Image (tube, rainbow, N blue to C red):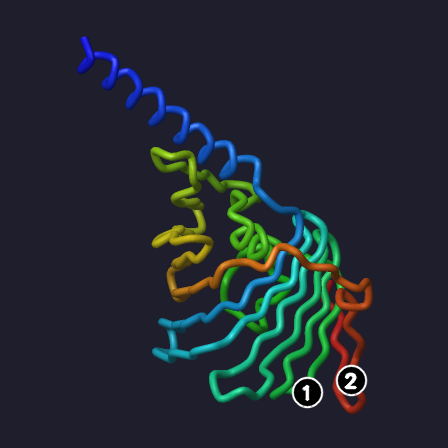
Amino acid sequence: MNTRINYFLFLFLTLFLSGCVTKMAKEGAYQKAQWETKALIKNLRENKTQSLNIDIYAVKNERARFEISAILGYQVASLVMSPTEISYIIYPQKTFFYGRNSETAFSRMIDLPLHPMNLANIAFEEPVRGPGWKCALDNLGWLSQCENVQKKIRVEWLGRNEGQKRVVITAPQFEMQWQFSSPQTEVQFKSELFTLKQPSGFKAIQIN
């Protein structure tokens, strides 16, 4: 009799805890956050590899800022975006891009046909959005992967541990290993954080 009671108690606790994890994963525990991340990006076409630090400041589904620097510390790029507008600076090229946000908006920075706001979605563990994308959950209700078969792009969430995670993005000529630290969620962002201006001496290019 005691064995049967212990079994049902164990089963109840397992189902209850699994339900809590699923609820947190699906609903999201925070609306805005800041991450420190490291990325290893491989350009398979040119056989080149680049290691970057990427700091992310984001409000879910609304706006995001990415500060990208090389491992040695020098600035590579700054990017600010909303679902409909984007602007970014590529410092080595002394260029400032601005205009409509779309799958091709930052093709001059990364060879990846993905709407830039999906990078923020990945950080928030939200599904990748857009035509042709399908996502799957693991047995605890966490996102495990999103894939676009037609474009041959896959996003996988791996190695979660107390807020830390590893994300792998693969495409025909591109691979990105993306390591996230635990998010800072008690943050207050000033509105000017999500504004990017053309630096003096930089060429401005409008994105159509």
Count of marks, rendered view:
2
Q: Which residue is mark 1?
A: 94
Mark 1: secondary structure? loop
- Count residues near mark 1 (Cα–Cα under 10 Å), then give few for <14, some for 14-19, many for 20+: some
> Would you place residue 142 above or below residue 48 in this image?
above
Position of residue 207 in the picture relative to residue 24 (left or right):
right
Please report the residue visible at 55 percent of the width from the left and 80 percent of the height from the top: 69
> Would you place residue 66 above or below residue 11 in this image?
below
**In this view of the protein, which residue sits in the foreground, 161 or 120?**
161
> Would you place residue 157 above or below residue 178 in this image?
above
The residue mark sitting in front, 2 or 1, is: 2
Residue 65 disc label? none
Q: Which amino acid type corresponds to the residue marked 2 in the rendered image?
A: Pro
The residue most toward the bottom is: 201
Position of residue 117 in the picture relative to residue 144 (left or right):
right
Mark 2: secondary structure? loop
Position of residue 91 in the picture relative to residue 188 (left or right):
left
Real-space Cα separation, disc 2 to disc 1, in angstroms: 8 Å
> Would you place residue 4 above or below residue 84 in this image?
above
Please report the residue visible at 57 percent of the width from the left and 50 percent of the height from the top: 121
The residue most toward the front is: 2
Please report the residue visible at 80 percent of the width from the left and 76 percent of the height from the top: 197
Position of the C terminus, as image quadrant, is bottom right
Q: Position of residue 89 (x, y in %)?
A: 68, 77
Closer to the chain start, of discs 2 and 1, is 1
Q: Position of residue 41 (x, y in %)?
A: 42, 72
Q: Quadrant of residue 85?
A: bottom right
**In this view of the protein, which residue sits in the foreground, 158 or 155?**
158
Q: Position of residue 6 (x, y in %)?
A: 24, 18
Residue 199 disc label? 2
Mark 2–mark 1 CB contact (< 8 Å): yes
